Amino acid sequence: MFESYDDAVQFLYTNLPMFQRIGAAALKPDLSNTLKLCEALGNPQDQFKSIHIAGTNGKGSSSHMIASILQEAGYRTGLYTSPHLKEFTERIRLDGQPVSRAFVLDFVNRINPHIAQIKPSFFEITVAMAFNYFAEENVDVAVIETGLGGRLDSTNVIQPIVSLITNIGWDHKDILGDNLQQIAGEKAGIIKHGVPAIISERQKDIDTVFIQKSGEMQAPLLFATDVYEVRQTQMKGTNILHVVKDGNVVFDSMELPLQGNYQRKNVAGVLAVVDALRDSGFVITDDQVAKGLTGVVANTNLKGRWQILSRRPLLICDTGHNIDGIREVVRQIQAQEYERLHMIIGMVKDKDITSILAELPRDARYYFCEAKIPRALSAEQLHSAAQAAGLHGEIIRDVNDAIITAQRVAGDGDLIFVGGSTYIVAEIENL
């Protein structure tokens, strides 16, 4: 029996295979462990309504936006996302509040007798914990984000009322497939028989994957951008959305605190999910949708999405970490006004380092760091690869030391960006 939350969480970190630490070796190629864990807990995944979300980029932001809208509509809302940035309890939320440490401790003690027999991964345990929590708390609905892929993701034991698939891009090719069609096929694995499937955006050569899968599953399919047009403008540092549905203005000058230009793609999918929820009996007004989007950061404590940490010099972080996410980050940087650009970058070993570095600005001063996890690419290796790509700077292993150094040499009109890996952003102090 564990006596403290810290002991229980440390046990999960050190004794269970964890993707964050060791990568693909932590993954089990089927759902059997999750099903055994759920069975031991009385199958909590069948005791609440859910919304299932997969995708390469945008699934986290979309999950938080949907949860925020449901909270504004008065529904008792669960939210499961991964990885966490600062605290393990961030992964499991109820109406925006993290699961209590007391519940985590109690759960680990209850499930511990089954661990030796089932041999689950860290992620499988956290999924079972989330489902158990949502069932015990009698949520009206839970928003469930996949961890990796979809078809074989541990979360894929739920029967949702609607499924959402966001942008498909290049990530985890060693696990999901070496072309976008294969990756999309893995994500499409969350589409269930007869359950409405929303695809956030049309992408050339990928649409047919979802059309075929939804046909096989007799699931209603909707590409959100066929219905919603979302335009995005900046006004005094705030994102302003103009939303048109079937030619009619739905929202005009609606504020969205999430900054990246890529959010307009996510918003279309989120609004289409709201329509599907309404069709299934949820009562959600347009005013509640607007309040949910405007209040998403406050309602769900979402962090790390083009987040402004300080000004003069402007300091921004973003968790974008694959080639498509980095491209969006670079577009956003190019849209900013600044005198000089400082890039604090760290990555993990299993990314396409060369392709990502080729996307980064050449006219920046770089600070190469590394996260404190085994998967981290060493700052020396990153520095060497960056030099070969024509990027120049210095090695400062700790991200916070790099921020202090950049702030010391930067002028008030400069821009400092921190990113390249979720785990780099997670180590920023006072995030």
Image: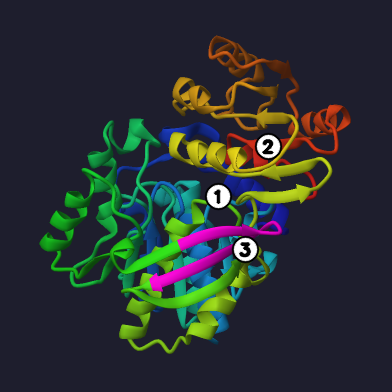
Foreground label between 3 and 2: 2
Q: Is mark 2 on a helix, strand or loop?
A: strand
Residue 318 percent location from the top left of the image: 61, 44
Foreground label between 1 and 2: 2
Q: Which residue is drawn at 35% across and 43% down?
A: 28
Prevailing SS of the magenta stretch: strand
Q: Image check: 283 left or right of 414? A: left
Residue 256 percent location from the top left of the image: 59, 65
Rendered image: mark on residue 83: 1
Amino acid at dot 2 = Val
Quarter of the image with the N terminus in it: bottom right
Q: Distance between the residues labelled 1 and 2?
A: 18 Å
Q: Residue at x 18, y 68 (%)?
A: 219
Q: Is mark 1 on a helix, strand or loop?
A: loop
Q: Residues within 10 Å of mark 3 (few under 14, many from 20)?
A: many
Amino acid at dot 3 = Val
Give the residue pinned by disc 2.
418
Residue 255 percent location from the top left of the image: 61, 69
Range of magenta residues: 231-244
What coloring was used for the rendering? Answer: rainbow
